[in-house]
Amino acid sequence: MYNLITMNLNNHHMNIGIALRGVRAKLIKNFRVNWSLLLFNMSNAAAINRVKVERLKNAYKGKRIFIVCNGPSLIAADLDKIDRSGDYSFASNKIDKIFSQTAWRPTFYCISDETFQFSLLETMQKIPAKVKFFRTVSYMTTRRAGGNCVYINMNGDRALLNHPRFAEDCSKELYGIATVTYVMLQIAVHMGFREIYIIGCDNSYGKEVKKDGTIVDNGTASYFAGSDEKNRATVAATWEMNVAYDFARRYADEHGIKIFNATRGGYLEAFERMDFDLLFDSKNQDIK
């Protein structure tokens, strides 16, 4: 009887501890968001940012760009080709983990993940991108990222999974559905790119959560060689990502935007496949 009571008390204390940690995490998140918005709107940052976003609208009209994802198919040799060709490129999150393997550096950089936007400051500071895009709600941290930072209002409502939207003009807000790749696609379109090639998007993870909540361990790599080992524990909802990719394809088709999947292998089938190597001639020059 005593053991049973003790066990119940221990379970009760454990549940309280979990609940308190959840409350603490929510309070910290709310503080960061509210403080970021206050700092952003009370300073001249908001006015300066509006001008930056407006100037980026169609600034690269008629150009092509590579959206560089962090999947296991991403290799330094392909990035070297992009570097030598002088093409524009867009990368995200912990892309710096591949810098030791290549001279390539992204033209544009983005973080939209709620966790990464507060935890990857050192990484943000390493990225020598021409423009770095962050969510406005991360301003308290990302204002120290260095370089030319642009802030966007992101609508990440879960209802978008049933009613997806795509923002061609990011001056008001853009839409977050499951993956930073979707955010980068919208920003690229805002900047005028109408020929977009996605690489390194395997659309498969070591662990995936299905629509019914079931978690499947695929036992495969989730990110490129040399990336952070901690990321191997990531559980991703690829079915949600497919909602985003399918809608991006639909929007692109309706608006004369060409989005191609130039990933080596993988499971991304929403976009027409393109052989990455055929995008460059023997001298690795653009063959547009």
Image (spheres, rainbow, N blue to C red):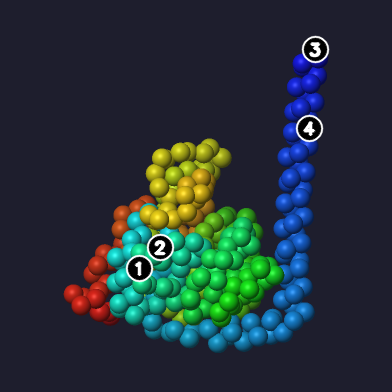
Q: Position of residue 134 (x, y in %)?
A: 59, 70
| Residue in view at x 77 percent, y 17 percent | 4
Residues at circles 3 and 4 in contact by the CB criterion of under 8 Å? no
Give the CA separation, mark 3 to mark 1: 65 Å
Q: Is residue 263 above or below residue 82?
A: above
Nearest to N terminus: mark 3 or mark 4: 3
Q: Where is residue 246 in the image (x, y as percent from the top left)?
A: 45, 59
In the drawing, does residue 135 fall left or right of residue 229? Answer: right
Give the CA separation, mark 2 to mark 4: 44 Å
| Extreme residue in the left direction | 282
In the drawing, does residue 272 fall left or right of residue 178? Answer: left
Q: Quarter-wise, where is residue 38 in the image?
A: bottom right
Nearest to N terminus: mark 2 or mark 4: 4
- The residue labelled by disc 4 is 13
Nearest to N terminus: mark 3 or mark 2: 3
- The residue labelled by disc 1 is 102
Give the CA separation, mark 1 to mark 2: 7 Å
- The residue labelled by disc 2 is 98
- Mark yes or no: residue 132 visible: yes
Q: What residue type is labelled 4?
A: His
- The residue labelled by disc 3 is 1
Give the CA separation, mark 4 to mark 1: 51 Å
Q: Quarter-wise, where is residue 255 in the image?
A: bottom left
- For the residue carrying disc 1, how many other residues have a C-alpha within 10 Å: few (<14), some (14-19), or many (20+)? some
Q: Where is residue 274 in the image (x, y as percent from the top left)?
A: 29, 65
Q: In what quadrant of the picture does the N terminus appear?
A: top right
Give the CA separation, mark 3 to mark 4: 18 Å
- For the residue carrying disc 3, how many other residues have a C-alpha within 10 Å: few (<14), some (14-19), or many (20+)? few
Q: In what quadrant of the picture does the C terminus appear?
A: bottom left
Label 1: element kind:
loop
